[in-house]
Amino acid sequence: MTTPYLSPIKYTQLTALRNERDYQNSSAEMTSGGISSGYGNIQNVGQFINQELILHGIQNYQESATLNKERMSFVSNQMATLRDIAVELQTRVSLLRSSPLAKPQELMTWSHDKLEQLTSLLNGRFDGKYLLSGTATNIPAVVDLGALPAVGASDPIDMTYYQGNNQNIAFRADDHTIVETPVRADDTGISELIFALRLCANIPSADMDTRLARANDMALQAHEDMVITNSKLDSNLNILLNIQDELLELSQSITENIKEIGYRTQTAVLQDYMQSKSQLELTRFVTTSQLNSIKDLINQMKS
């Protein structure tokens, strides 16, 4: 049985390669600020990996929170526009009821235009999704509101315009909290506004007073109901913002834990760096000397 044997030159070459690798690892550790170059340098590998996984989960929540905050803000802006329309509708109706100079046709035209605007608002998309359709975000929330048939002054509120479902969009903000977007296009305030506009989009002279009186009351009620809905949305948005702050603090804390587990002191890193550098320089010197000796021997043999 033969015993593996390394010549002095081969041994020196292997030593040089090993020292080169150690030097590269030490250099990388210096550059990173002391993070261990591999799990082999970490005292508690299980704890280190666990902390990394926790940090990864927190970062996912943070990315999701940013998107959901923008989405909820988008819906809040839509609601603000709807409330403004309700206020203006009530103002115009009051003017027509009180001023002999006001013309029904102007209110009818304005109301029809606003129904078209509501169609665009309620079918507005964020990140490619219809946010006011409930969880049916691939479906437009409403039909063309301007194309709906005329309604009578005493008709009940018609909800057939809505195409979504009855489930609110919800998402997990952290391990313990689910946040909803509590707004859909079939909400009471929105349906009241749509119906009030439909009442004013067609005003026969025979029942104008009755129609305008109901539209006026319904516009006021629509505004109140949308304020309530928007307050729920703002409350949930504040919950999300508070969770974002908590996630940021937790992320910073976990990052510090990872540093304590996976990083070493600058003194220890510098010591290893200097030692590996010295060893590398020594092996390079020895290897060069051996090669020069062999060259000298070959030259002597030739002569």
Image (cartoon, rainbow, N blue to C red):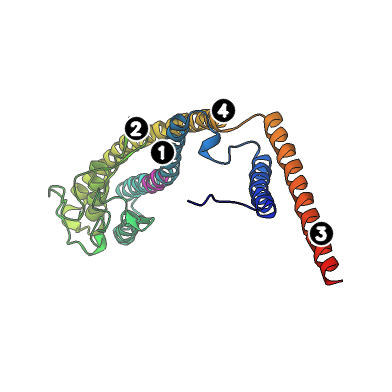
In the image as oriented, which residue stretches furthest toward the bottom?
A: 302
The residue wearing badge 1 is 57
Name the spot of residue 20 as percent of width and height, x first.
Answer: 67, 49
Mark pair 4, 1: CA separation: 20 Å
Structural distance between the alpha carbons of marks 3 and 4 = 48 Å
- Determine which quarter of the picture holds residue 179: top left
Category of crowding for the residue at label 1, using alpha-carbon neighbours closer than 10 angstroms: few (below 14), some (14–19), many (at least 20) = some
N-term-proximal mark, 2 vs 3? 2
Amino acid type shown at disc 2: Asp
Relative to the observer, which residue lies in front, 210 or 35? Answer: 35
Q: CA distance from mark 2 to mark 3?
A: 67 Å
Question: In the rendering, which numbered label is found on residue 249?
Answer: none
> Spatial distance from mark 2 to mark 1, Cα to Cα?
9 Å
- Disc with the residue nearer the chain's start (1 vs 3): 1
Q: Magenta segment: does it hold 259?
A: no
CA neighbours of label 4 inside 10 A, class few (<14), some (14 to 19), many (20+): some
Task: Say what secondary structure mark 3 lies in.
Answer: helix
Which of the two residues, 154 or 43, is positioned nearer the viewer here? 43
Image mark for residue 260: 4
> Do labels 4 and 1 touch, CB within 8 Å?
no
Q: Please state which amino acid type lies under the numbered disc 3.
A: Asn
Instruction: Residue 54: give x, y in percent of width and height.
Output: 42, 34
